[in-house]
Image (cartoon, grey):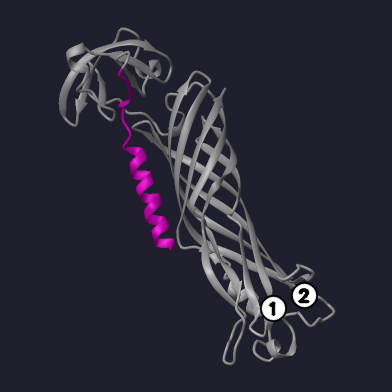
C-alpha cells in the first residue's frame, strides 16, 4: 500500500509541473473562449492569441476581456466550432505555451479567496458495510440464531447532506457529510412449536463523514484532488417479540449497537460552473478504505428471563454465546471500495 501511495504522489508531482495555458471553457451562445491565463502573464485586452491542438495551430484570435488570472478571447466565426477545451493557448508574439508556477493550482482563474458549498451526497458504495439480519429458529446442528437477508452499503434514498469550505488560494478543501442508511424491518416466526409468536428485527444506521482534500491540478474545467476521508458509522439493532394473535406480547429481547470508524484515501474530481459569486458544482470521489477502528459493539438483553426470551434453555444449548453470535452476524466492517457523488451550490467571496 505504501508503494502505491508513493507512486500516486510521484505522478501528481510530475503532472502539476507540466501545466501550461489552455482553454478551460467555451460559451456556445456568445462564442466566448475562456483561458486560464490573464494580465499577470501577458494576456491583456487586445492581445493576439493562437490556439493549438497538440502542435497543430488551429486558429488565432484576440483577447476581448482580461483580469489578473483569466481572459476571454474570440476567433473568427468560421473557426469557432473547431476550438475545444484543453487546446493550448499562446500569445501571438511568443508562439510558445505560457507556463505557470504551481503555487496555487486550485485558484487559477479565481479572484475569490473562499468558497462555501451546500451539497447533496449520493453514495452507491459506502466505506462501511453491514448485514441486515433476520431471526432464524434454530434446530439441532444450528450454529447461529441469525441469517443475513441482505448487505447494506449505500446511501441513496434519502440522500446525505453536507457542507464544504474551500480556500481557493491554497487549494485546500474541508468537508462534512451526514447520511442515513435505509432501515430494515423483518418479522420472522419465533418457534415452530409456537406459531403465533414472531420476532421482528429492526436495523437502522447513521453515517458521519469528514474529509480534507488538496486540489493539485485544474484542467479542462475540472479540479483534481487528493485527500483523506474519515467515516463513522453506527448500526442499531432491536429484536422484539410479538404475539401475532392479539399483539399482547411486545417484549424487546435484544438491543445492540455497533460503531465503526474507517480512514480512506480520497481521490476527488470536481467540475464547477460559476456565475459571479454563485455557482454549481459536482464532485465524484473514489474512496479506498485503508484502516478500520472497530467495530465496537454492545449487546443488552433482559435481566429477568421470560418464557419468550431467546435465552430459554433449548436455545442456549445450541448457541451458548448469543452476544458474540449477534455481533458476528451483523458483520459490521470496512468495505474494499467506496464512491461519493456530491452535487451542490456554492458561494465564493
Can see residue 118? yes
Would you name the residue on which mark 1 appears? 323
Question: In the image, is residue 114 part of the stretch drawn in magenta?
Answer: no
- What segment carries the magenta color? 1-28
- From mark 1 to mark 2, how far is it between C-alphas? 9 Å
Q: Which sits in the foreground, 76 or 101?
A: 76
Query: Which residue reaches farthest top?
Result: 46
Query: Which residue reaches farthest front?
Result: 245
**Residue 174, image quadrant:** top right
Q: Is residue 268 above or below residue 185?
A: above
Q: Is residue 245 left or right of residue 280?
A: right
Question: In the image, is residue 18 part of the stretch drawn in magenta?
Answer: yes
**Residue 293, image quadrant:** bottom right
Q: Residue at x 63, y 83 (%)?
A: 192
- Whether tag 1 and tag 2 are in contact, CB under 8 A, the answer is yes
What numbered label is drawn on residue 301?
A: 2
Q: Which dot, 1 or 2, sits closer to the camera?
A: 2
Q: Residue at x 37, y 39 (%)?
A: 16
Q: Is residue 25 above or below residue 130?
A: above
Q: Residue at x 32, y 15 (%)?
A: 29
In the picture, the quarter occupied by the N terminus is bottom left
Q: Which sits in the foreground, 65 or 340?
A: 340
Q: How many marks?
A: 2
**Badge 1 element:** helix
Location of residue 66 in the rendering, given as x and y in whole percent from the top left corner? 39, 13
Amino acid at each position: 500500500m505504501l508503494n502505491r501511495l508513493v507512486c500516486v504522489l510521484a505522478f501528481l508531482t510530475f503532472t502539476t509541473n507540466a501545466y501550461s495555458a489552455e482553454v478551460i471553457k467555451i460559451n456556445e451562445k456568445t462564442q466566448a473562449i475562456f483561458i486560464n491565463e490573464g494580465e499577470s502573464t501577458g494576456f491583456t485586452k487586445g492581445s493576439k492569441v493562437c490556439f493549438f491542438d497538440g502542435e497543430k495551430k488551429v486558429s488565432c484570435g484576440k483577447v476581448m476581456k482580461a483580469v489578473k488570472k483569466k481572459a476571454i478571447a474570440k476567433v473568427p466565426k468560421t473557426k469557432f466550432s473547431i476550438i475545444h477545451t484543453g487546446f493550448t493557448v499562446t500569445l501571438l508574439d511568443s508562439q510558445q505555451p505560457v507556463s505557470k508556477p504551481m503555487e496555487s493550482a486550485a485558484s487559477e482563474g479565481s479572484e475569490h479567496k473562499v468558497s462555501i458549498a451546500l451539497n447533496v451526497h449520493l453514495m452507491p458504495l459506502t466505506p462501511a458495510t453491514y448485514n441486515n439480519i433476520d431471526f432464524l429458529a434454530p434446530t439441532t446442528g444450528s450454529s447461529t440464531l441469525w441469517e443475513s437477508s441482505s448487505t447494506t452499503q449505500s446511501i441513496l434514498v434519502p440522500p446525505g447532506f453536507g457542507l464544504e469550505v474551500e480556500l481557493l488560494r491554497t487549494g485546500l478543501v474541508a468537508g462534512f457529510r451526514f447520511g442515513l442508511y435505509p432501515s430494515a424491518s423483518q418479522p420472522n416466526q419465533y418457534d415452530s412449536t409456537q406459531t403465533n409468536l414472531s420476532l421482528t428485527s429492526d436495523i437502522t444506521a447513521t453515517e458521519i463523514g469528514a474529509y480534507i482534500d488538496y486540489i493539485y491540478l485544474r484542467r479542462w474545467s475540472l479540479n483534481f484532488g487528493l485527500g483523506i476521508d474519515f467515516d463513522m458509522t453506527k448500526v442499531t439493532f432491536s429484536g422484539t417479540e410479538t404475539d401475532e394473535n392479539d399483539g399482547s406480547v411486545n417484549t424487546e429481547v435484544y438491543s445492540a449497537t455497533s460503531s465503526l470508524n474507517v480512514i480512506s484515501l480520497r481521490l476527488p474530481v470536481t467540475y464547477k460552473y460559476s456565475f459571479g459569486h454563485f455557482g454549481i458544482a459536482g464532485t465524484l470521489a473514489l474512496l479506498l478504505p485503508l484502516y478500520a477502528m472497530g467495530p465496537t459493539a454492545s449487546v443488552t438483553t433482559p435481566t429477568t428471563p421470560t418464557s419468550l426470551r431467546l435465552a430459554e434453555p433449548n436455545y442456549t444449548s445450541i448457541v451458548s454465546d448469543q452476544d458474540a453470535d449477534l455481533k458476528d452476524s451483523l458483520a459490521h466492517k470496512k468495505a474494499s471500495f467506496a464512491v461519493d457523488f456530491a452535487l451542490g451550490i456554492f458561494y465564493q467571496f
